Amino acid sequence: MLLSTTRAQGLPARPLRLRGRERFGTVGPVTSDLALAVDIGGTKLEVGLVDTDGRVQRRARVATPAREGAEDMFGALAGLVAEVLADGADPVVCGVGTGGPMTRGGAAVTPINIPAWRGFPLHGRLAELTEVPTFVDNDAKALALGEGWIGAARGWRDYVAMVVSTGVGGGIVLDGCLLDGADGNAGHIGHLIVEPDGHRCGCGAVGCLEAEASGTAIAAITGRPASEAGPDVVVRTGTLVGRAVASVANLLDLRLAVVAGSVALGFGDPFFAAAQSEIDRSARLDFSTGTVIRPGLLGADGPLVGAAAVGWRGLGVPVGP
Ligand SMILES: [Zn+2]
């Protein structure tokens, strides 16, 4: 059991107050093995309970009130937490995946597609609300943890996970560890330059993967939503994603890319075939030859499973390979 590992490691070292009583201390039994998982996206907010095998036991969701006030937004989230915990469920940790950018650990989050929150103190507010140890990370990094835990990257110690949907996000696991970087932003594969003479990206650069292959970019370039894209757009998008993956494989000595997100999964086989073809063409070093790209396996559970993994990781419980 994962939690016995936590206790064996003596984490956390000091007793933590969990809704009024000490339960996860250095002595005494752990009576719960659930994570409260929180996914904050531009379209929906979702909260769930996820067990130590990665199963989603309960969930509640609501459309994101992205353009209302900061407290309206947090109130909607708090309502979901209350709904999920209504019958006395007692999670030991809260894990959160959210769009960025954010300062390290989610002390202040500014999700690009949620104008209601600009520098919102998400970590502090959720920790206060839930009274359990709380850990916040980028949603694509969360998905990388989730896919390594029980998804398409299970058993792999080195891989990149990507989300190709409205935007393009990513997370990198190397030597079995999720990369954080100086401010926690490692893995922003959406801003690798894949078309030097391409389109202007929201970040200010030109030709970023996100400016060429995201759902937003495809709609801007073609005048139609990605769900109505023709075969040429599907192949072009796959090729550009493959180009970015090849660069990452060459740079980091990893051989697997797991790709989720509505655009990639909606495009399906032709997208993945085009991406694989470009990887085969561009990842040519001895160690990068044979790099593969696969669809993510977590489906609609991915955001909650990933958020739970952020929580377990924060507690020091291994959820990866
Ligand atoms: Zn960019």
Image: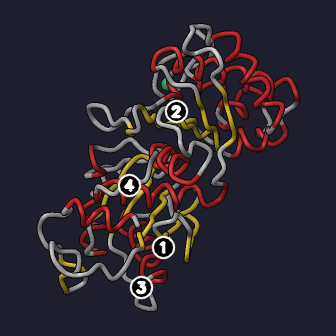
Q: Is residue 115 visible?
A: no
Q: CA distance from mark 2 to mark 3?
A: 34 Å
Mark toward the viewer: 2 or 4: 2
> Residue sitting at 26 percent across and 31 percent down?
182
Task: Give yes or no for contact between labels 3 and 1 (Cβ–Cβ under 8 Å).
Answer: yes
Q: Closest to the observer: 189 or 217? A: 189
In the image, residue 26 above or below residue 188: below
Task: Determine the secondary structure under disc 2.
Answer: strand
User: Is 159 on the left-hand or right-hand side of 18?
Assistant: right
Q: CA distance from mark 3 to mark 1?
A: 9 Å
Q: Which residue is mark 4?
A: 117
Task: Determine the secondary structure under disc 4.
Answer: loop
Q: CA distance from mark 4 to mark 3?
A: 29 Å
Q: Which residue is mark 3?
A: 89
In the image, residue 64 above or below residue 257: below
Task: Determine the secondary structure under disc 1.
Answer: strand
Q: Residues within 10 Å of mark 1 (few under 14, many from 20)?
A: many
Q: Earlier in the sequence, mark 1 or mark 2?
A: 1
Q: CA distance from mark 1 to mark 2?
A: 27 Å
Q: Amino acid at mark 3?
A: Ala
Q: Position of residue 48 (x, y in %)?
A: 50, 71
Q: Position of residue 320 (x, y in %)?
A: 44, 48
In the image, residue 125 above or below residue 121: below
Q: Closest to the observer: 230 or 130? A: 130
Mark toward the viewer: 1 or 2: 2
> Residue sitting at 31 percent across and 75 percent down?
130
Q: Which residue is mark 1?
A: 49
Q: CA distance from mark 1 to mark 4?
A: 25 Å
Q: Which residue is mark 2?
A: 159
